[in-house]
């Protein structure tokens, strides 16, 4: 008896990506042809450019925020929708082309093997990135990797990667975690302490061709304080995700 693969909700936050979307959508379409269980959901965070029209013309499902809420709330919207609709598997990636859709099968394969959460790492060997990263940002990434790895007891090279695949149990825990801004390392620590099995695999990422990153200048400070408070919020998180 052949088992039909369960659909995978692919959450794609989008904010002013009109210049990046055409190429991204072409690549996404090619991947969907090979893996029809992938079901994209664009979360349009009140884009001011032509992003909405491009997504609509391509025929992809999308949800529109009435106001600009930010990246983390765009993810929350997608997670809540997917949980309500009964999805068991999820993909998270950006619509700016930095996360190539053709790398999605690698994440799905790793998820189906033995993980609850798969992180696509832009680092292949050690801290060698798949595209040029400014020295100061790369230094910060290494710092948070080492700190997160120390706190979790598991080596994670790319703690700020938004290219992920995960199961329903992880999705339910991520909803309250993403109420905070930039919870990257914080999320890894909390999920690991909730016994979510995390796996990291190297993927090829690309530099953003157009537009600006949603990461703010105060990201390092917010991420550091988030890690600190995560040490004391586990019990509260458990209560919120327990039916």
Image (spheres, helix red, strand yellow):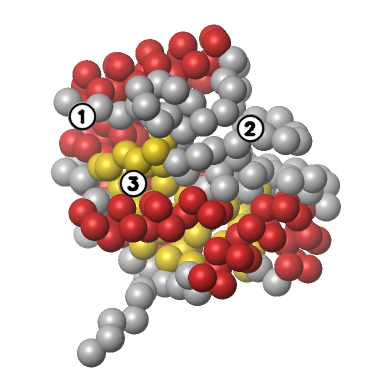
Residue 163 position in % (x across, y down): 47, 43
Which residue is rendered at x = 48% and y = 26% of the image? 129
Residue 204 horizontal side relative to residue 7, left or right: right
Rendering quarter of residue 213:
top right
Residue 27 position in % (x across, y down): 64, 58
Q: Is residue 141 visible?
A: yes
Closer to the eye: label 1 or 2 = 2
Residue that numbered label 2 is attached to? 207
- Bin the neighbour count of mark 3 within 10 Å (Cα to Cα): few under 14, some 14-19, many 20 and up: many
Of callouts 1 and 3, the N-terminal one: 3
Of callouts 1 and 2, the N-terminal one: 1
Which residue is rendered at x = 33% and y = 58% of the image? 109
Residue that numbered label 3 is attached to? 118
Regarding mark 3 in the picture, which secondary structure is present there?
A: strand
Q: Nearer the viewer, residue 45 or 41?
A: 41
Q: How many marks?
A: 3
**Tag of residue 30:** none
- Bin the neighbour count of mark 2 within 10 Å (Cα to Cα): few under 14, some 14-19, many 20 and up: few
Residue that numbered label 1 is attached to? 154
Q: Nearer the viewer, residue 201 or 179?
A: 201
Q: Is residue 206 above or below residue 144?
A: below
Q: Residue furthest front?
A: 125
Residue 149 position in % (x across, y down): 25, 23
Of callouts 2 and 3, the N-terminal one: 3
Q: CA distance from mark 1 to mark 3?
A: 13 Å
């Amino acid at each position: 008896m052949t088992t039909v693969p369960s659909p995978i909700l692919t959450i794609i936050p989008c904010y002013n990506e009109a210049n990046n979307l055409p190429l991204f959508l072409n690549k996404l379409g090619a991947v969907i042809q090979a893996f029809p269980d992938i079901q994209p959901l664009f979360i349009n965070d009140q884009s001011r450019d032509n992003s909405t029209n491009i997504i609509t013309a391509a025929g992809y499902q999308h949800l529109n925020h009435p106001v600009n809420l930010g990246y983390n709330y765009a993810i929350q919207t997608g997670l809540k929708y997917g949980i309500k609709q009964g999805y068991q598997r999820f993909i998270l990636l950006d619509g700016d082309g930095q996360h190539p859709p053709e790398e999605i099968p690698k994440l799905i394969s790793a998820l189906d093997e033995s993980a609850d959460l798969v992180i696509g790492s832009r680092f292949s060997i050690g801290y060698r990135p798949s595209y040029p990263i400014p020295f100061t940002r790369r230094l910060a990434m290494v710092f948070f990797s080492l700190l997160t790895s120390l706190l979790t007891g598991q080596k994670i090279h790319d703690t700020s990667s938004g290219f992920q695949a995960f199961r329903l149990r992880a999705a339910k825990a991520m909803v309250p975690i993403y109420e905070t801004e930039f919870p990257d390392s914080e999320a890894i620590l909390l999920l690991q302490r909730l016994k979510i099995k995390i796996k990291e695999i190297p993927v090829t990422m690309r530099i953003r061709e157009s537009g600006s990153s949603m990461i703010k200048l105060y990201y390092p400070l917010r991420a550091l304080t988030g890690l600190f408070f995560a040490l004391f919020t586990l019990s509260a998180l458990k209560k919120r995700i327990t039916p």
